[in-house]
Structures are given as structure tokens and as C-alpha cells.
Amino acid sequence: MEKSKLPRRFRVYLPLIILYVIMVFVLPRSPKFAYDYKKGSPWMYETLVAQFDFPLLKTDAQYQSEREKAGSGIIPVFRYAPEVAAKAEDRLTVADFGKYSGVKPALVAALETVYSKGVITDASYLDVQLNETIYVQKDRRAAKVPVSEIYTVSAANDLLLSVMCDTLAPAVADSLSANVLADLIVPDLNFDQQMTELIHDQSVSNVSRTQGVVKAGQVLVSNGELVTAEIEQLLDSYKEEYGNSVGYNGAPAIQWLGNALIALLLVVILFFAIYFCNYHIFDQYNKYLYVLLLFTLSAVASSVVAMTDPSYFYLVPFTLIALYLLAFFTKRLVFIVYFISLLPMLIVAPEGVELFVIYLTAGVIGIYVFDYFNKGWLQFVTALIVFVVMVVVWTAFRFVDGVEGIGSYRVVWNMALGALMSVAGYPLIYLFEKMFMLVSTSKLVELSDTSNTLLRLLADKAPGTFQHSLQVMNLADAVARAVDANVPLVRAAALYHDIGKISNPQCFTENETPGIKYHEGLSPKESAQEIIRHVSDGLALADKHNIPDVLKEFIQSHHGTTCTAYFLNQYLNAGGDPDDVSEFYYKGVNPVTKEQVILMFCDAVEAASRSLKDYSAESISNLVERIINGKADEGQLSDSDISLREVTKIKEVLKSYLQQMYHSRVSYPKRASRAVK
């Protein structure tokens, strides 16, 4: 249980070297604005003087207000149709007025007056009556026309009717109007929606984002001066122009050296995070490469977004890194690696601190809630929670900056899309599982289903062993949760660790048929070999049924290199040669990971507890101490990374669990022999 030394194999460092080279090239080589400031806070740096001319930007509220004003003041455009007036005059000229034809010249004159001004529909007039003017497009030229001078269809008909009423009786005029003038008036001005929208868009787009120019040499803010809204706008404008226009003015070698040092720092931090959290990942090369890949993806994504459009930082689902890690590792390692994976964003993003806090908070909450919402549609609940957390943290930063309201809805929309993409992108975990030959948490849960073929075979052929495995699983589950081990892994391992007993179930006491003593007639050496063989038989069955390698390691290590004590003692008591005892020892390997140690302890303690005659707290405590201390004395923990504190915690959990499992029951009183009426 001593602390491991740094790995000496070159293959551990080769991927780090490749990662380092990638980091050097992806880190941005343009200068970053070196000042952080908040409205209402004092300027903590030296007096800042503009080094170049730059445009003064309008505030977002001012810019949006001007765009809305420009859009609302658009004059509608109507397209003129000259053929309409000609057709109306022709119809009126040939119309039969009978004996009242004397009124026709006056009507023709009135019709010419109407169409000289223009006619629109009554509905169009209602839409434009608030406008003082409209544009009338004639011969590819648009002229402004007062709305008050234009006729509607109804107004034009009323004018013609009044002309007839001037010379004819009202009844006659009404009759002629209904028979001769019906549908005579047709609008010659038609609303051109496409042209109106085009003018609207042009007017809005023509609103300038700037409101003047600040000259080089002007003092922007002095040391200790309070950053007001006006000063903040000056600094924001200067910062944006600085990022767009200022190039690196120093020696290129110095810039490359800076990037190289930052890249080295990030790679070293990642290496030691793995070293301190789970040293044995270096031995599980596929897991090691997987962690480095996820870190690389996060770093590359951060750099690419920073160099293109920083607003897309809210769109990229960085929380997926945490979920991808959570599928294969414990939360302790996941949190540390996820934290480090966000460091490139902190370095390269314009609002690095804000983004770092947002994604760190969302990722940590996502890691926690994913335990409860990870199946089917419930993953959308996780996405919703992550989205809400991001919005809350982002809004908190807006309040700190003195911004009231939600501000930019584009940012919130990007957050929502990013949260949804975290759900859409999660199935890629199965691709990573195949690519890196890993076993995900969902796969372990699937393997733990007792209806699986191999577990059903164990239950049918070795029911006693199956019950033992279930008890070991429950014990291991409780212990793993107490010491922050991989619970799904240790549960699956507990179910499969004794599958080798399927080949010869009667050899083991838990499966013995009453009246049959399998070991009668066998020598202690033969019996020991029969017992020991269940490890190799288990590995063979695991190969046959395509059980993942990570579970095979548990089969091989759950007895380590211990001996079959019962038969060894029997052999020695019968006068056997103490120097010829190798056949009584398992040829396995000592447990390496914390989970393998947990399974060894739980397996041994559960089996030994069945031989207890007294299940008092003292008896159970002595059993647990004897078993675990015995394993340590035999050197079974020499290759593991488990700490003494964790071993002590494991003892406490095992004692408590066994006391509850073997609790005494109340004796039921016997019913009196007299009849009950």
C-alpha cells in the first residue's frame, strides 16, 4: 500500500509528448486583452491610455433601440399598375346609361381624378393610415405620396355616386350605380411586401454599431478610478478593437516559448492528476489514452471557438466531457480531469473566468444528477438541469456586472442547444467503448442482470455459489460506496468472480448434496487442486461467454496468491512436508485496484461468516479483523493502492453489514392448546 513511483515506461510518456505538441500549436498566438474589470469596481491597474484610434461602440441597449426605431419607421411600398385605370375608363365609356347618358362625361372626369391620385384597397388603407406617406413605385422609381390624397375603393365609389346624385334623382343614381358602376373601381396601387421588407432590412442593417472615434493618446481610465458605465463602454470598445486589430509585436520565438510553457503546465497538471487520483490508469493503457483524448478534444474545441466566434462557447457541450468520463471512471477522477479539461478555456476565452465557472458548475451538477436521470428520456431531465444551472450562473454574472434583465437571448438559446447536444452526443460513448475496448457503466449494469445466460447457468448448476455471489455483491456494494470505489464494477465482479464453480459445483460445500461428501477419498493435495481449479475454469468460461477483461481480472485476483488453508492444515497435521506446499496455493495475482481488494475482502468474509456459531457483535468483529489482517499479513495488499484509512473504513462497514444480516429474530410464542371460540 506504499505510494507508487512515477511510471518508467516510455509508452506512458509518448502520448503526453504528442498531446504537448498539439497544445503548443492550438494555443492562440494573438495577444489577449490583459485587463479584467467590472462596472462599479475600481481600476486596479496603471492608467490606461489608448495606443491607437478605435471606434466607440454603442451599448447593446442603445444599438437595439436604434435598430427597432429604424425598423418601425419604414414607409410601405406600393406598386403602380397603369393598365387598371385604362381598363376602367374603357368600361365606363362603353357602358349603357340609356336616357341618362348625359351624366357619363362627368363620371369619366371623376374617374380620371380618382386614378390620377391612386386607389388602394380598404384593408391596405387601414394598415397604412398611421403613416403620413407611402412610396408609389412607377417606372422603377419610387415617389412619396401623402396617404391623405389616395382613394380607397369605397371612397372612389362614393365619389362617383355623388357625381350622379348631382344631376339625377337619388333613386335613379342608386339604380345606375348598382347596374353600371358595380366592380368598376379596381385598386391600381398594390402593396409590395417583398420590397417593403427589403427596405426594412436595409434600414436596420444600416444602423451603425459605433457612435464616434476615440483618438490615440486619450486617457481611458486612471489608476483607482471607479469604472462607470461610460468608462466600461470605452474599455469594451478598446478591448474589441484590440482583439481585432492588434497583432503580436514581440519576437515570434518569445511567443512560441510562452505557448510552450503554458502547454507544458497543462500537460504536467493532467499527468499528476491521474497519478494522484488513480495511478493504475497508467497500467490500463486504453483508459489512459481515452482520458488524454477527451482532454485534447476540450482543448482543441476551446482554441477553435476562441479564434472564430467566442459566442459559440455557450453552444459547445463541454459538459459532455464529464459524462464521457463518468461512463468509465469514479466521480473522484471524473471531477479532477473535468476540472483540468476546462483550464484551456479559462486561458484562451475572452471571458475565461466566467465561462470556466459556468461550465464547472454545470458539469459538477451534471455528474451528480446523472446517477438519477441516465436512462431513456430521463437524460433530457439531466440536460434541462444543466441548462438551468448554466442560465442561473450566467445571470448571476450579469447581476454582478450591473446588467438588469436577461440581456442577450442568443446566449440563452445557445445554452439550450448546447444542453440538448449533450444528450444527442452521449450515445458516442458506445463508439468510444468499442474504439478503446472499455467497459462503460451501462455495460456493467447490463452484465449485472441476473437473467444473463452465464448467471442463470450459475444459479441452476451451483445455486449455493449463486447465493454466495449475491451476498458478496451486496457487501461489496455497501463497501464501495463507503470508500468511493466504482460501485457498478464491483457489483458485476462479485456476480462473476466464482463462475468457475459451474464446472464442478459439488466440490464446494455451499453446493453439496446432503449425504454426498465430494472430498472423501481425495488427498489434501487433490482436494486443494480441485478447489484452486475454479479460478482457471472461471477464466475459460469468461472467454467463452465474452466477459470483459476487466471482470476477468477479478476472477484471477479474488483469491490472490493465498492458500487453501483447510486442506493445507490437514496436510501438515498428517505429517506432510512443509517444503512441499506449493500445490496448496492459488496461482493468481494479487489485487491491484481498490475494487479488487474490496472483492477479496467481501468474498473471504462472507464465506467465513457462514461458519460462525455465534453472531454477536464481538464474534463478527473478531472474524472481520482476523480475515482482513490475515490478508494483509500474507502480502495480498502489497500491490494495491488502497490506504490504511480505507481498510479501516471497510472493516467498519463489513462489521455493521454482517451484524444486520445475521440479526437475531424474536421467538414467536406458542398458542395455548385450549380451543379458541
Image (cartoon, rainbow, N blue to C red):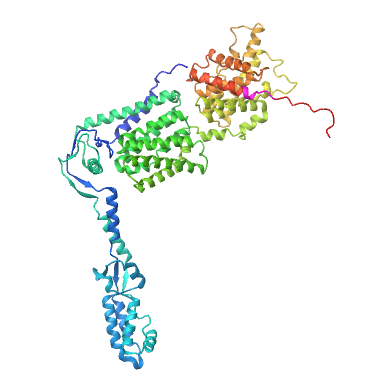
The total number of labels drawn is 0
Q: Nearer the viewer, residue 293 or 576?
A: 293
State the residue lying farthest toward the left: 217
Would residue 417 appear left or right of 473 to someone viewing this image?
Answer: left
Residue 402 higher or lower than 480, as above or below: below
Q: Residue at x 79, y 28 (%)?
A: 671
> Residue 177: x, y in percent?
37, 85
Residue stretch in magenta: 659-665
Q: Check residue 175 for magenta coloring.
A: no
Residue 587 higher or lower than 579, as above or below: below
The image quarter containing residue 40 is: top left
The image quarter containing residue 137 is: bottom left
The image quarter containing residue 15 is: top left
Is residue 286 at all visible to an observer of this figure?
no
Residue 530 higher or lower than 291, as above or below: above
Q: Nearer the viewer, residue 657 or 284?
A: 657
> Residue 127: x, y in percent?
34, 67
- In the picture, which quadrant includes the C terminus? top right
Q: Nearer the viewer, residue 100 or 556?
A: 100
Q: Check residue 662 for magenta coloring.
A: yes
State the residue lying farthest toward the bottom: 99
Would residue 611 appear left or right of 432 to someone viewing this image?
Answer: right
Would residue 99 appear left or right of 436 to someone viewing this image?
Answer: left
> Residue 635: x, y in percent?
52, 14
> Residue 620: x, y in percent?
62, 18
Is residue 204 at all visible to an observer of this figure?
yes
